[in-house]
Every structure is written in C-alpha cells, then in structure tokens.
Image (tube, rainbow, N blue to C red):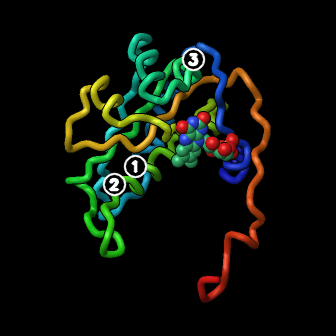
Amino acid sequence: MDLMEVMKARRSVRKYRPDPIPEDIFKAIISAARVAPSATNAQPWKFIIVTDEELKLKLINACNGQKFIAEAPVIIVGCGLPDEAYATVGGYMNSFAMDVTIAMDHLILAAAAYGLGTCWIAAFKEDKVRELLGIPDDVRVVALTPIGYPNDQPSKESRKDLAELICYDKFE
Ligand SMILES: Cc1cc2nc3c(=O)[nH]c(=O)nc-3n(C[C@H](O)[C@H](O)[C@H](O)COP(=O)(O)O)c2cc1C
C-alpha cells in the first residue's frame, strides 16, 4: 500500500486477536517512530512497550475501563520529555506533546501498513499510568495505543467536508 492508501485504510480498532506480532514487523513499526521529525530534532520521547499480561490488565483501569486495550498483545505508551523539548513553540508552548504525537502517528500508520490495528487512547489518568509503569515526575504521558491484529473491521467514521477545514489567505 502506498502512504495515501494506508492513511485511508487506518481505523480505530477496538477488538483484537491475541496473535503475537512478528519481531521484524514490530521493529519496523517502532523504527517509523524513530524517524519522525521533532522541534530542534530533540526527539523528546520514550515509548514504553507493555506486553506483561498483568500490567496490560491494570492499564484498563488507568484508561477509564477501556477493556479492549488488553486484548492486544502490546500496548504502547507514548511519553514526552518536556525538559528535552523545544520550550516555546509560537512563543507560548512546549513542543513535547506535538513531537510525541507526530512520532506516535508515524508508528500508527506503519502498523496500518502491516495490517495491524491500533487505537489512539487519550482517555486515561496520567497519575495511574505513571504509578503502574514507574514513570518519573518529569516525564509526561501523552497517549497510548494497543497494537495487534484486528478482530473486527471497523466502519469508516465520517469526516468534515474539505471545504470546512480550509480557508485562503485569512482566517474565516
Ligand atoms: C487524541 C485522540 C484521542 C483518542 N482517544 C480515544 C480513546 O481514549 N478511546 C477510544 O476508543 N478512541 C479514542 N480515539 C479514537 C477516535 O475516537 C477516532 O480516531 C475517531 O472516532 C475517528 O475514527 P477512526 O480513527 O476510526 O478514523 C482518540 C483519537 C484521538 C486522535
């Protein structure tokens, strides 16, 4: 699949088969995150790869009871390192969340290219994820995703019309 096809094919998958992900494929997917751009090329991220069954089950509670995340063989927890990131995007914002999100999206699209399912998880309690995975205070949890072979073919979610997304020359 070319990139446009992969982007169109990706869906949020909420049912997974337990089948393991072949090591070479998993490495390729993680490598996609590695090549992502970041402000000042700081690469202010760490991806925690959770495969321990007990920990995966405990993460359900930290993710507001979203049970399907533990069906997948792997849960990836995308963490940001604010102290290493560019501090003033636009003069007002630390870049870590942006940087981690771009890298996670690389990873998620790479997974889709290999026929693997993912689902952005932002409904989580940071303190609970932090406690379960021993994440230090200066590291922020940005998003999680399960990753595994889909056990479902989710339908296509609607999108705004293109005309609604864009304007020319001035904000309208
Ligand atoms: C930042 C972000 C957070 C999300 N958090 C959750 C979540 O916690 N649980 C969930 O089931 N889906 C979550 N989603 C998935 C969205 O519901 C989904 O992307 C949207 O409905 C469009 O569907 P699609 O991904 O299949 O195209 C999240 C998506 C994004 C981008």
User: Which one is nearer the viewer's eye here, 110 or 54?
Assistant: 54
Name which of mark 2 and mark 3 comes first in the sequence. 3
User: Split into 4 quadrants, where in the image is the N terminus?
Assistant: top right
Q: According to the image, label 3 marks what residue?
A: 71
Label 3 Cα neighbours within 10 Å, binned few <14 / some 14-19 / many ≥20:
many
Does the numbered disc 1 mark a residue whose Cβ is under 8 Å from ligand 1? Answer: no
Q: According to the image, label 2 marks what residue?
A: 96
Q: In which quarter of the image is residue 112?
A: top right
Residues marked 1 and 2 touching at CB (< 8 Å): yes
Q: How many marks?
A: 3
Q: According to the image, label 1 marks what residue?
A: 100
Residue 111 in view of the camera: no
- Which percent across, then down, holds residue 127? 31, 34
- Which percent across, then down, holds residue 133? 30, 25
User: Mark 2: which amino acid?
Assistant: Phe
User: Split into 4 quadrants, where in the image is the C terminus?
Assistant: bottom right
Residue lying at 51% horizontally and 34% vertically, measured from the top left:
145
Name which of mark 1 and mark 3 comes first in the sequence. 3
User: Mark 3: which amino acid?
Assistant: Glu
Q: In which quarter of the image is residue 118?
A: top right
Label 2: element kind: helix
- Which percent across, then down, holds residue 163? 76, 73
Label 1: element kind: helix
Q: In which quarter of the image is residue 50?
A: top left
Residue 92 in view of the camera: yes
Label 2 Cα neighbours within 10 Å, binned few <14 / some 14-19 / many ≥20:
many
Q: Is residue 99 above or below residue 157?
A: below
Can you tell which mark lies on residue 163? none
